Amino acid sequence: MQKILVTGGCGYIGSHTIVDLIENGFDVISIDDNSRSTTYLTDGIEKITGKKLKNYKVDLKNFDETLAVFQENEDIMGVVHFAAYKSVSESVEMPLDYFENNLFSLINLLKCVKEFSVPYFVFSSSCTVYGNPDKIPVTEESPIKKAESPYGATKQMGEEIINEFSESYHYNSVLLRYFNPVGAHPSALIGELPLGKPQNLVPAITQTAIEKLPQLIVYGNDYDTRDGSCIRDYVHVCDIAHAHTLALQYLVEKKNITNCDVFNLGTGNGVTVLEAIKAFETVSGIKLNYKIGQRRSGDVVAIYANNDRAVKALGWQIKYDLPDMMRTAWAWELQVKKDEELMQKQNPVLN
Ligand code: WQD
């Protein structure tokens, strides 16, 4: 079986991608320092796939420890790199931590890829590289504008680094630009586990619905859109996960056009914040407690993808629609609550 190293494998998109890779016949190991994740999701991976994930609790900023993982696994034939800090607002407060963590990790990883001649590299990028686009839907040729945050800048620089690396050393990479990954695995055994108060819309919706949060604030309804709230391209995390498997297969089958092909991973449908809330209310039967608040600085007014290239070149097919996204996100939130209550019963002293 072909062995793939997934970095950030204990995280939201990493864990869903590992499930998809295993289900498509790959052998997978993970590097995750658990600085922003726990083993909760790896337990879920095992329940879904029957396979116990080998996770190396290593900080990718530590080159020697990262190299040791490659020395122990000389049969790694591909890397899927998720591990990074990803909060837009936090990156504004601590830009140097973001540049250090996200870029030093990537550079160390690429040094190991070169040292061990690992042929394939897939990078978790983001639509944030487009900034506030002049024209939507955005294609992969849409202009890369000034990043709206240090987080977005690390994704733009990361793409540049991988591009130059792949060209200079004739490696084969794929950059996947996610739009807004949401939802959870249909089993409700893995999903999004935001640390602290959720920044992103869908976990904020489900945590409000389950009364973990007192009320959802809609950050502005005075934008120039059909209902005044911002437009995004929400895409199910399982569709995003499967695109990584397709990207690896695309590289293995030498279908890539350049040393560093780029793909938009969005559904092509723009959805407003208020429409997303309505979709949640419809599938959950819950009237969501929200109010309209001030705009959030750095928010893009409207962005959604032209995904033709991923559909044609990768054979990517969107399987989940907006109701599925909300239904699986809600089922996951209910499951987490059940697990928390079970843990409380078993360890009352913890709370
Ligand atoms: C979506 C919309 C908010 C929370 C970011 C990163 C992107 C990717 C996904 C990593 C916006 C509104 C949100 C809330 C709200 N991250 N909102 N109330 O900002 O589009 O993208 O996360 O890869 O790179 O930039 O996602 O979910 O934070 O916001 O009204 O409590 O929901 O204003 O319009 P965003 P988001």
Image (cartoon, grey):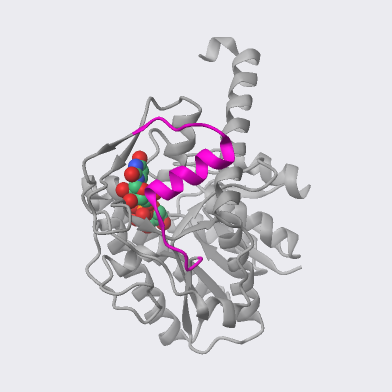
Say if 269 sits above or below 216 in the image: below
- Residue 33: image location, x then y, percent: 49, 45
Snapshot quadrant of residue 155:
bottom left
Left or right position of 50 against 45: right
- Residue 56: image location, x then y, percent: 58, 49
- Residue 126: image location, x then y, percent: 40, 63
Q: Which residues are magenta?
A: 267-290
Say if 211 sits above or below 206 in the image: above
Snapshot quadrant of residue 216:
top left
Say if 20 sits above or below 252 in the image: above
Q: Nearer the viewer, residue 19 or 8?
A: 19
- In this orientation, does residue 90 appear? yes
Q: Quadrant of the N terminus?
A: bottom right
- Name the residue rendered at 38%, 25% in the picture: 214
Left or right position of 14 against 163: right
- Name the residue rendered at 48%, 66% in the picture: 266
